[in-house]
Image (cartoon, rainbow, N blue to C red):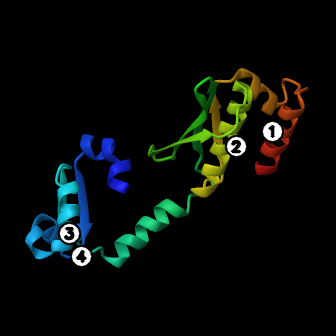
Amino acid sequence: MTAGKLRPYFLSHPTVVLTNSPLGRIVTHAELSIRMVKWTIELEEYDIEYKPRVAIKAQVLTYFLIEMVLPREEEIWRVVVDGASNLSGCGVGVVLIAPSGEKIKLARRIDSRVTNNEAEYEAVLAGLQASREVGASRVIIYSDSQLVAQQIRGTYEAKNKKMLKYLGLIAARV
């Protein structure tokens, strides 16, 4: 089922499966397991390579966790947000840029119909939530919506009830 849903991704990219079990040997040699024949037939059209998982030294993993999970107080993350609404649907896009320059890209579809300004506010909220999840303590948010940016800064007054509600949600998360 997963292979069917992710078919465009599997067809356009080579896939490497790291495993400690002999899964690659079983899938590539159908005679080892009759029950695996169907899976083998379905998966053989994809460029899947099976490699043994190599050992990770515990200290290296610890250093990685320290670097990625514990940002320094002076580090500032940049969050680029954009929201859109049209006849085919509504959605938001967020790019988190770590102080080291690494990028994390997120996209989310909005289930309800919203205006472009509401979609821009949803993008800001999604960016704030994502930055909190990665542990960013300080962020600068970049938005292409002058209205939303100026309302958040307090330069423009929000008169619409929905915009006031969004401003309250943002203020609660800052």
How many neighbours does mark 1 have within 10 angstroms: few (below 14), some (14-19), or many (20 or more)? some
Residue at point 91%, 26% (across, down): 159
Mark closest to the chain's N terminus, 2 or 4: 4
Residue 168: quarter of image: top right
Q: Are the residues at dot 3 and dot 1 in contact (C-beta closer than 8 Å)?
A: no
- Distance from Cα at disc 3 to Cα at disc 4: 18 Å
Up the image or down, 106 lies above or below 80; here it is below
Give the left or right position of residue 54, taking residue 74 as reference.
Answer: left
For label 2, the residue is 125
For label 3, the residue is 36
Front: mark 2 or 4 = 4
Quadrant showing the N terminus: bottom left
Residue at point 18%, 49% (across, down): 45
Residue at point 63%, 43% (across, down): 127
Q: Is residue 23 visible?
A: no
Residue 59 image point, x, y percent: 37, 76
Residue 18 image point, x, y percent: 25, 66
Q: Nearer the viewer, residue 170 or 30?
A: 30
Mark closest to the chain's N terminus, 1 or 2: 2
For label 1, the residue is 166
Query: Residue 20 bears which disc, if any?
Result: 4
Q: Is residue 91 visible?
A: yes
The three-letter amino acid code for the residue at tag 4 is: Asn
- Distance from Cα at disc 2 to Cα at disc 4: 40 Å
Residue 102 image point, x, y percent: 44, 46
The three-letter amino acid code for the residue at tag 1 is: Tyr
Mark closest to the chain's N terminus, 3 or 4: 4
Mark closest to the chain's N terminus, 2 or 3: 3
The three-letter amino acid code for the residue at tag 3 is: Met
- Distance from Cα at disc 1 to Cα at disc 2: 8 Å
